[in-house]
Image (tube, coloured by chain):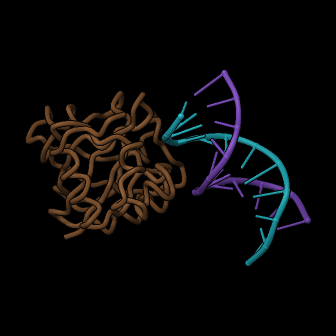
Chain colours: A brown, B cyan, C purple
Amino acid sequence: MRYWLMKTEPTEFSLADLKRRPGQTGGWDGVRNYQARNNLREMRLGDRVLFYHSSVKVPAAVGTATVGREAYPDASAWDKKSDCHDPKSKSDTPLWVMVDVKFEAEFPRPVTLPEMRAMPALQDMFLVVKGMRLSVQPVTPEEFAAIEQAAQSPAPPA
DNA sequence: GCCAACGTTGGC
DNA sequence: GCCAACGTTGGC
């Protein structure tokens, strides 16, 4: 099993939104970055996903999800009315893919970006080193566990 | 195929 | 709202 981090703006699609979906499952479409797409293709059923909220006052990991369906064509790329429309994507060779994710758990408290930056266990984490511009990132089992554990513990003093 | 210019992203 | 970092584009 592999571990991932996926970024979303909660105003667009939050963890609470996912939880409210039928079957608590939602399609993760709109990824238009090649490196992120390649990560989507690597995802396997049951892989675990850290759910990260960006572009808010305090960016944070807020919970977890699992991969409910492996990569399949992202139809929004062909939809001329969609913000995510991409004329480069031809129907015979889908350029962009999406996965389905299933709600797993909401953390007892958010683990914030500054907190993650401060955690010794996360000094080599992709998010900490390279930032959040890549919307689908790999996470090591150790990093994933450290963040889950932090979420179960009291927040550190600010 | 390189690289400068440009646009976008996201944290602050 | 600003700016740094990065991905993408297009001219050569």
* Horizontal relation, residue A58 to residue A86: left or right: left
The residue lying furthest to the left in this view is A23
Residue A133: x percent and y percent?
A: 50, 49
Residue A106: x percent and y percent?
A: 16, 40
In the rendered view, tell whether residue A13 sits above or below residue A111. above
Name which residue lies at 26% across and 51% down.
A50
In terms of depth relative to the viewer, which is nearer, A70 or A152?
Answer: A152
The answer to which quarter of the image holds residue A17 is top left
Residue A75 visible in the displayed image: no
Name which residue lies at 39% across and 32% down.
A58
* Horizontal relation, residue A22 to residue A93: left or right: left
The answer to which quarter of the image holds residue A95 is bottom left
In the rendered view, tell whether residue B12 sits above or below residue A33. above
In the rendered view, tell whether residue C1 sits above or below residue A69. above
In terms of depth relative to the viewer, which is nearer, A48 or A75?
Answer: A48
Residue A65: x percent and y percent?
A: 19, 50
In terms of depth relative to the viewer, which is nearer, A67 or A108?
Answer: A108
Name which residue lies at 25% across and 46% down.
A27
Image quarter hosting the C terminus of chain A:
top left
Name which residue lies at 34% across and 40% down.
A112
Residue A70: x percent and y percent?
A: 23, 62
Q: How many marks?
A: 0
